[in-house]
Image (cartoon, rainbow, N blue to C red):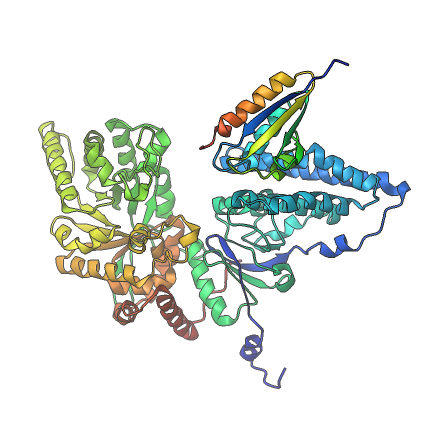
Amino acid sequence: MMECTMVERTVLVRNRAGLHTRPAAMIVKLAAQYRSDIFLESEDHMRINAKSIIGVMTLAAAQGTTLKLIVSGPDEEEAARAIAELFENGFGEPI
Amino acid sequence: MSADSDPGDSRAAVLELRLQGSAASRGIAIGPAVVLAPLHRRLLQWQVVAPSDRSAEVERYQKARDLLLASIRESLTATSFLLRDTHAIIEAYELIATDPALDEAIYTRIQRDGMPAEVAVSTAYDAHIHALATATDSFLRDRRYDLENLRQKFLELLLIPEQQVEHVQGAIVVAPSLLATDVVNYHTNGAIGIVTEVGGITSHACIVARTLGIPAVIGVRNATMIIPHGRTVIVDGSRGTVIAQPNEQTAAHYCSLQREQVSLQRHPVPSAPVATADGITIPVYASVDSPDEVPPALSHGADGIGLVRTEMLLVRLQHFPTEQEQYQWYTMLAERAYPKPVTLRVFDVGSDKFIHGMPHEANPALGLRGIRFLLRRQDLYRTQLRAILRASEHRNVRLLLPMITSVEELTATFDLLATIKSELANTNEPFDEHLPLGVMIETPAAALLAEHFAGQVQFFSIGTNDLTQYTLAADRTSDLVAHIFDQLNPAVLRLVDHVARIAQRHGIELELCGDLATFLSATELLIGLGIRAFSVAPSYISALKRRIPTVDSGQARALVEQALQCRDSASVHALLLDRSTTLTSTSPPEPPLP
């Protein structure tokens, strides 16, 4: 086993429509490409698996919501950067 | 029942059930109900599965999940090239069905808690549905319908192994809820209408229904309990009304409305123009988008082409076509219709009909569209007018101008035409010196100023879709104001009446294109108003040609006087309904289509 640290980042839901079906699908598809465990946690400490679309949708995060991104595993740095970027770009939707 | 054996009486005794939901997809469908029973009872009364049977239960769940995935993937293939938005939505369904967290939750419920598969699936989905239901954002809140739909589909696969999909041909599907994939599948298998108990009008199933053009009413509470399986149901997707076991009068009304939607090809259609009962000839033209549609239109009995939406050429080519490209296309249209007339409407583009490089406008319907765009880009306008003039050499081409609101727009066009004509004459190129010119009456301004156009053009073509939208200030693509958008509103009729009087005084041909032309219950009214030609989609021609000879223009005028005095759309509809039932009492209506 390799030694696992943990990466934490704060991400902001920037796109106008919030984390609806399509952005949720984008997160899940991207997360599935990494071996690390990837979680999103809401301000009220609800933590979900970012590889689960239903979990991401259940966050019901509207525009302006701040989430904690927690990644732990062999490719954690890379995974955290990629997912944070997706949030930063507003999922390619109007901001 | 009483001793009275009159069949009419016993039929009148059947109770008509009117249910109100939300209008989700426009149009009218009439057919037998296929009611997909709700599963509540099975889910409420269950017993713990014995530990030895739990592996079999897990297998049952996995089998249903595979079926669900297969059905989702089948829809993905079916929609891959057709519906881009739908495709993305169904892709998300695939991710939900394979969701690792959900899969684990269901597995645990079966193995550890001994739940039957359907109960495990239902409760696992429910946990997430409830979480979404409390979202403050309405778009996210509506997403729970996607989960509800998927759960429903899952349960149906678990509980009803043999899907009833083969039996929906010609039927109305009444279901607790439907997936976007179900709408695609039912549509493919011949279902003609949709009624559901839940759903928001922005839910994906509704978006798909609208894309496919299948009438749908959603949010009809307890629909699966109230609507009897196999009985006739009317779905009015424009008003959000569902009528089960309609009485004779209602059925007759909706049958006639429905006939207006559907192509009737059972009888040979006269290939010559037909006349009213009192001998006024009313040509019925076809509205088309390309030369390919001309031969089928003529075989449907078209007396010519009343509208070619030339902007479809732009959409096809994805660039502004050269004069030669346009000339060939217009010539093909003219030759295929010859000797019947072809009406070429110049490019009606605007930022709603996207052409690359056009400016974005917040309100495209009120922006730079139609003639306004062409006069701004006179290089393009000149090219098109030259191509049209050159294609007019057989003298069966007519020119039509969209979105006119002022006389200046007409004058500018005349100037361009005059220059081009002299150029063509100088190079000895043949063209029709007397190319008939018409203006679209589709804005209140054009209607009110018709007198000033009258001396300069040969025909008026009333576009009722836009005229209604602009008169009632109701976006015709918005469901939220669909109850206001009504082409029979007396405000619209008064404008038509005004234009008709001017057309008659100046001896100008008055035509009508747009959806209103396809409402057979309004044909008499329109002829009474002074409409002397219609242009409709080819599939409506035969029905309209059979309707026209039943109209007497004198009686029609009396109907017009009443309609013009109506205070609202509903009164006009009531008047027409009353009129159609008077007529059908003497001659029975045709039976509804199968």
Residue B433 seen anywhere in this rendered image of the structure = no
* Residue at the outermost bottom position: B3
Which of the 4 image quadrants contains residue B312? Answer: top left
- Left or right of B116? Residue A30 is left
Q: Nearer the viewer, residue A20 or B556?
A: A20
- Left or right of B76? Residue B519 is left
* Residue at the outermost top position: A2
Q: Nearer the viewer, residue B15 or A85?
A: A85
Residue B287 seen anywhere in this rendered image of the structure = yes
- Residue B144 vertical placement versus A90 (above, below): below
- Picture coordinates of residue B130 (x, y %)? 65, 47
Give the position of the N terminus of chain B as an image quadrant.
bottom right
- Picture coordinates of residue B29 (x, y %)? 51, 57
- Picture coordinates of residue B436 (x, y %)? 17, 45
Residue that appears at 14% across and 60% down: B505
Q: How many marks?
A: 0
- Picture coordinates of residue B443 (x, y %)? 25, 51
